[in-house]
Amino acid sequence: LENGDAEGIDISFKYDFRRFYLWTVYSCGFIHRYDGRDEYVPHYDRRHNVNIVSSYTFGENFNWGLDLRWNFGSGFPFTLNQGYYELIAFNDGVNTDYTTVNGDLSVIYDEINKGKLPTYHRLDISVKRKFELGRNSTLEAIASITNVYNRKNVFYVDRITQERVDQLPLMPSIGLNITF
């Protein structure tokens, strides 16, 4: 490996009939990096990924739409903490009294990206309605919910405080689009 290598498989299925559309895809990837000294998996190496997307158009004039998207992904790699130590800056050089000065808490890292975050999954749903305003203008009203079942997907964990920060909570939204 010079800078890196990636290999994997993708399997997908599409179904489109009248007012219903379904697309599913599964991918399995193996990504490796070599930095001239070590070979490791980079932070974006998601081994398994599944997406299911569906859309249904309905109503008297087919002016309603329902869209669903579900995504699953195996956990991303990350570098674990091996320990902590006090980092003293020695701002006064040899005159710094290391017995009384307060340093900053610093991290001793484990091997690069040997840990794995938990799996990720979420369901998003939206309903939309189109209104014909004129010959060449349309108004579309959209209501959607991101992360319908409020899954706690980890975004990161603060290395010092161990506080976990999650990604998008259950998040409703509404919007209007006008085309003319």
Image (cartoon, rainbow, N blue to C red):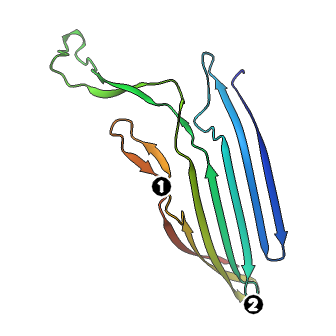
Q: Image quadrant of residue 15?
A: bottom right
The answer to whether 109 is drawn above or below residue 20 in the figure is above
Identity of the residue drawn at 61% across and 69% down = 125
Q: Residue furthest right?
A: 17
Q: Position of residue 6 (x, y in %)?
A: 73, 33
Residue at the location (63% across, 56% down)? Answer: 71
- For residue 60, the mark is 2
**How far apart, in angstroms, are the residues tagged by discs 1 and 2?**
39 Å
- The x and y percentages for residue 162 are 36, 40
> Could you tell whether 146 is left or right of 137 in the image?
left
At x 66%, y 67%, the residue is: 68
Above or below for 164 versus 93: below
Check residue 152 in the rendering and tell me which mark sits there, or answer none: 1
Q: Earlier in the sequence, mark 1 or mark 2?
A: 2
Q: Amino acid at mark 2?
A: Glu
Q: Is residue 104 left or right of residue 134?
A: left
Q: Position of residue 172 (x, y in %)?
A: 50, 70
134, 89: nearer the viewer: 89
**Which amino acid, mark 1?**
Lys
**Residue 173 placed where, x, y %?**
52, 71
Image quarter of the C terminus: bottom right
Query: Is 99 positioned to the left or the right of 140 in the image?
Result: left
Give the answer, above or below, for where 43 lies relative to 101: below
The nearer-to-camera label among 1 and 2 is 1
Q: Nearer the viewer, residue 135 or 23?
A: 23
Rate crowding at label 2 as few (under 14), some (14 to 19) or many (20 or more) other CA atoms within 10 Å: few
Q: Secondary structure at mark 2?
A: loop
At 76% across and 65% down in the image, what residue appears? 22
Quarter of the figure that contains the N terminus: top right
